[in-house]
Image (tube, rainbow, N blue to C red):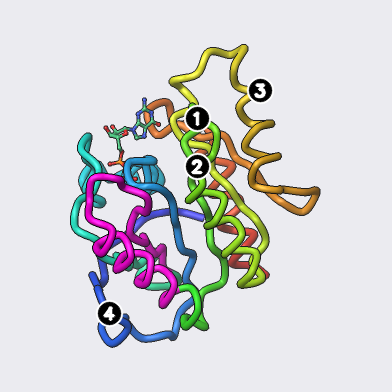
Amino acid sequence: MDFVEVDLLKTAVSFEQYPDTLVPEIALVGRSNVGKSSLINCLTNRNKLARTSSTPGKTATINFYQIQKDRYRIVDLPGYGYAKVSKAEQEKWSAMIDTYLSKRYNLVQVIQLVDARHAPSKDDITMADWIRHYNFNTIVVATKIDKLKKSQIDKNLTEIYNDLQMDNNSILIPFSAEKRTGRNDLIALFDEILSN
Ligand code: GDP
């Protein structure tokens, strides 16, 4: 699979604003600042396609990216669990995520991103439960792996695997947007998801 011809198709805040359902969608979820935009930019070799930021909590939108002239889409869901926004705002974001996950029938897979440096947060664990609840296989990308010492990697990945109740059917991909680690694995995974 080639990530050529990638474009932001649509930015939505409500269900009514979603684009048509004619092509399969793969959604990315994760805490605010987990590295979702950096991952999208790394996959697509576009520095500024998705907006990255060192200060988390930018406006919550659902961004639909069309890949290969809309053969399929990558959907960037709002980052959850950003403590500095109000509870009401956080609830609004979570409702946006829930609406998308529960109503989008052309959604073929959800991929959850967690920060490889830390144990999964309560929100990460809730999200993993939610994803299982919607009957998706658990696929987790552990981001910012370049920030870990070699000796820490296995220990942290095991913690993520256990805390998110992953099993033999689950997939855990260590990833670094900075070093492009795991990029090929992710691309192969996208291929596999879309060939099913
Ligand atoms: P988002 O809020 O999930 O979209 O996160 P961003 O992609 O904006 O990244 C948040 C911060 O983490 C930014 O300062 C990025 O430069 C940094 N970051 C993202 N991915 C990586 C990575 O693989 N390695 C390192 N070292 N930093 C990263």
- Distance of mark 4 from mark 3, alpha carbons? 40 Å
> Residue at the spot x=32%, y=41% of the render?
33
- Distance of mark 3 from mark 1, alpha carbons? 11 Å
Residue 32 screen position, x and y as percent = 33, 47
What segment is highlighted magenta in the picture?
Answer: 73-100
Mark 3 within 8 Å of ligand 1, using the beta carbon: no
Give the residue pinned by disc 2: 121
189 on left or right of 71: right
Residue 177's place in the image compared with 153, above or below, is below
> Residue at the spot x=42%, y=85% of the render?
21
Compare residues 126 and 142 and report the one nearer the observer. 126
Give the residue pinned by disc 1: 118
Few, some or many residues within 10 Å of mark 4 (<14, 14–19, 20+):
few
Do the numbered discs 2 and 3 sit on residues whose CB atoms are within 8 Å? no
Residue 65 screen position, x and y as percent = 33, 64
Give the residue pinned by disc 4: 14
Do the numbered discs 1 and 2 sit on residues whose CB atoms are within 8 Å? yes
Compare residues 67 and 118 and report the one nearer the observer. 118
Amino acid at pointer 2: Ser
Few, some or many residues within 10 Å of mark 3 (<14, 14–19, 20+):
few
- Distance of mark 2 from mark 3, alpha carbons? 16 Å
- Distance of mark 1 from mark 2, alpha carbons? 8 Å
> Residue at the spot x=50%, y=18% of the render?
148
Give the residue pinned by disc 3: 155
Few, some or many residues within 10 Å of mark 1 (<14, 14–19, 20+):
few
Sequence order check: which comes first, mark 3 or mark 1?
A: 1
Residue 64's place in the image compared with 178, above or below, is below
